[in-house]
Image (spheres, grey):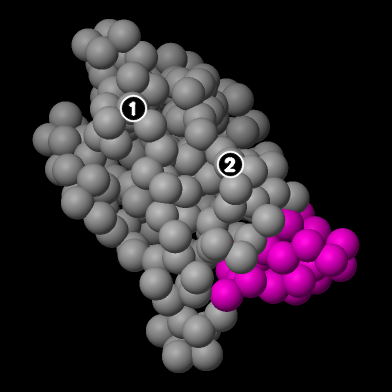
């Protein structure tokens, strides 16, 4: 990680508002995602499942790359309907390896069905996946106070615990780094920088 990147704090957008530096310049779609979604608490199981698929696809890639293929994933995986994904056949999954609208990694594609089945098991056991995942942060967002991007951790004890439990239940592509990214995206933690206009808003 370059020191210049680590030292970045916020970046001023074309609208004059300061955002987390990872948004970059000249990326309206990324600004929109940052402003409206990233860090906003999610309690809807459907949305959690969507992010689990997308975060798993991100492994080894940039989040920006995955977001640009979000619509492709939505079409390929039945609108992120966990029950429909859990029921996908081997033939359907194999066919997705020829789909340029998603990341055509065989193991990542197969993991969507595997993780969907575990997701449904968790729903049955815990009432909802949301109740399950929020229990790892005590039911309320963990609010941090980072001034620079380099201060933000890639894993925490909470993401370690959640990752370990999901792996034990049978999910894959749910390492602690991936799970912490999920926690950030779905608002289990507030990792907006203190100078970002979204920090207080979420």
Q: Which mark is residue 202?
A: 2
* Residue 174 in the figure: left or right of residue 3: left
Name the side, left or right, on which 116 lies relative to 62. Answer: left
Position of residue 20 relative to residue 93, above or below, is: below
Number of numbered discs on residues: 2
User: Which of the image's four quarters has the N terminus?
Assistant: bottom left
* Residue at figure coordinates x 51%, y 34% from the top left: 41
Q: Quadrant of residue 30?
A: bottom right
Disc assigned to residue 13: none
| Residue lying at the far right of the rendered structure | 15
Question: From where the camera sits, is residue 195 visible?
Answer: yes
Compute the Cα span from label 1 to label 2. 15 Å
Give SS at disc 1.
loop
Crowd rating for badge 1 (residues with CA inside 10 Å; few <14, some 14–19, many 20+): few
Choose top left, top right, bottom left or bottom right for residue 19.
bottom right
The percent position of residue 88, horizontal first and vertical second, equals 43, 23
Q: Nearer the viewer, residue 100 or 37?
A: 37
Which residue lies under the disc numbered 1? 139
> For the magenta stretch, what is the residue range?
9-31
Secondary element under disc 2, as helix, strand or loop, is loop
- Residue 71 part of the magenta segment: no
- Residue at the outermost left position: 168
In the rendered view, tell whether residue 65 sits above or below residue 21.
above
Q: Observer-nearest residue: 46 or 15? A: 15
Q: Residue at x 46, y 82 (%)?
A: 6
Q: Nearer the viewer, residue 108 or 89?
A: 108
Position of 38 compared to 61: left or right?
right
Q: Residue at x 31, y 9 (%)?
A: 127
Mark 2 Cα-neighbour bin, 10 Å: few <14, some 14–19, many ≥20: some
């Amino acid at each position: 990680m370059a020191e210049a990147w680590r030292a970045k704090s916020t970046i001023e957008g074309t609208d004059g508002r300061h955002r987390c530096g990872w948004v970059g310049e000249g990326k309206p779609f990324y600004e929109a995602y940052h402003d409206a979604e990233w860090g906003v608490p999610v309690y809807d199981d459907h949305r959690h499942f969507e992010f689990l698929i997308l975060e798993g696809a991100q492994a080894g890639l940039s989040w920006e790359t995955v977001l640009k293929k979000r619509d492709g994933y939505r079409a390929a995986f039945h609108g992120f309907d966990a029950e429909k994904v859990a029921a996908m056949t081997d033939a359907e999954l194999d066919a997705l390896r020829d789909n340029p609208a998603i990341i055509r990694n065989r193991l990542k594609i197969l993991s969507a069905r595997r993780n969907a089945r575990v997701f449904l098991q968790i729903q049955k056991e815990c009432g909802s996946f949301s109740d399950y995942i929020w229990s790892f942060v005590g039911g309320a967002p963990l609010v941090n106070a980072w001034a620079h991007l380099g201060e933000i951790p890639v894993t925490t004890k909470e993401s370690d615990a959640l990752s370990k439990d999901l792996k034990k239940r049978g999910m894959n592509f749910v390492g602690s780094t991936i799970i912490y990214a999920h926690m950030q995206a779905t608002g289990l933690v507030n990792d907006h920088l203190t100078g970002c206009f979204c920090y207080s808003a979420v």
